[in-house]
Image (cartoon, rainbow, N blue to C red):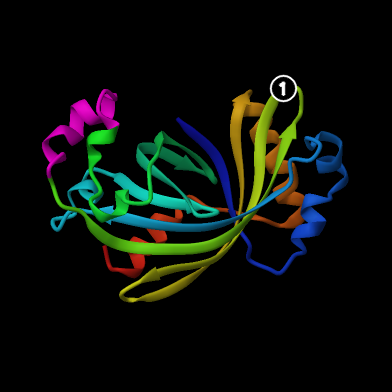
């Protein structure tokens, strides 16, 4: 399960200012700041069977280490996204012949994916961005504050990525949400109910 707050930057701000905010300083985990080079490739069948079932299948390289991810269902309200998520590390050859078989044994596989195990998958879109992140611990929740900047790349053109996210790792969802609301008000962050993948689909007219 993935639980996160998503915000779009509608005006220029210093991300260093956000990451070094006095409240963030009090709760940040020592030496948890990190920068990741992200490349995400989203896949579907020729008939877009996954999209039609509100499922996203991607392979994302995090500093060149590939991870296969499945996301499905869920809800988004005032920037709070809650959805199913599975992550499985894969090897570099996986993209040559991607398969849903590695998600066998999960509820989502048994209910929606088993009939697509032998399907062929091709790229729908690609994303390239740099993520700056820091882990926060309020003693009631542990979350990761991140900033993504880059591009969504599609056959119909590209769209920029400039997003702030606060993802819950453990603990109280209400506590994480309260923290996000304080930061969004202070830095005029705009809650977004649209994922990066959905933005790419809109560009593709899907």
Residue 9 image offset from top left, x and y in percent:
63, 62
Query: Predominant secondary structure in magenta?
Result: helix
Locate residue 43: give its quadrant.
bottom left
Query: Left or right of 42: which side holds 196?
Result: right
197 versus 104 height, above or below: below
| Residue 94 or residue 32, whichever sits in front | 94
Quadrant in the rendering for residue 141: top right
User: As displayed, is residue 3 above or below residue 6?
Assistant: above
Res 129 quadrant in image = bottom right
Q: Name the image quarter holding the N terminus.
A: top left
What is the residue that sits farthest to the bottom in this orientation? 157
Residue 202, how many percent across, how many down? Answer: 34, 64
Q: Is residue 8 left or right of residue 186?
A: left
Q: Position of residue 54 (x, y in %)?
A: 28, 44
What is the span of residues highlighted in magenta in the rendered image? Answer: 103-118
Q: Which residue is mark 1?
A: 140
């Amino acid at each position: 399960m993935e639980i996160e707050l998503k915000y779009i930057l509608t005006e220029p701000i210093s991300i260093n200012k956000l990451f070094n905010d006095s409240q963030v300083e009090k709760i940040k985990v020592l030496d948890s700041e990190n920068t990741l080079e992200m490349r995400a490739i989203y896949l579907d069948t020729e008939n877009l069977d996954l999209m039609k079932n509100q499922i996203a299948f991607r392979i994302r390289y995090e500093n060149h280490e590939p991870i296969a991810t499945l996301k499905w269902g869920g809800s988004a309200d005032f920037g709070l996204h809650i959805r199913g998520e599975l992550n499985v590390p894969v090897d570099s050859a996986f993209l040559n012949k991607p398969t849903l078989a590695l998600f066998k044994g999960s509820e989502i596989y048994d209910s929606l994916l088993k009939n697509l195990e032998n399907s062929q998958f091709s790229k729908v879109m690609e994303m390239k961005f740099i993520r700056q992140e820091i882990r926060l611990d309020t003693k009631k929740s542990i979350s990761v504050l991140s900033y993504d900047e880059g591009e969504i790349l599609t056959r119909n053109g590209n769209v920029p990525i400039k997003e702030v996210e606060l993802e819950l790792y453990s603990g109280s969802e209400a506590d994480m949400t309260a923290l996000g609301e304080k930061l969004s008000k202070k830095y005029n962050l705009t809650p977004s109910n649209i994922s990066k993948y959905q933005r790419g689909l809109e560009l593709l007219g899907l």
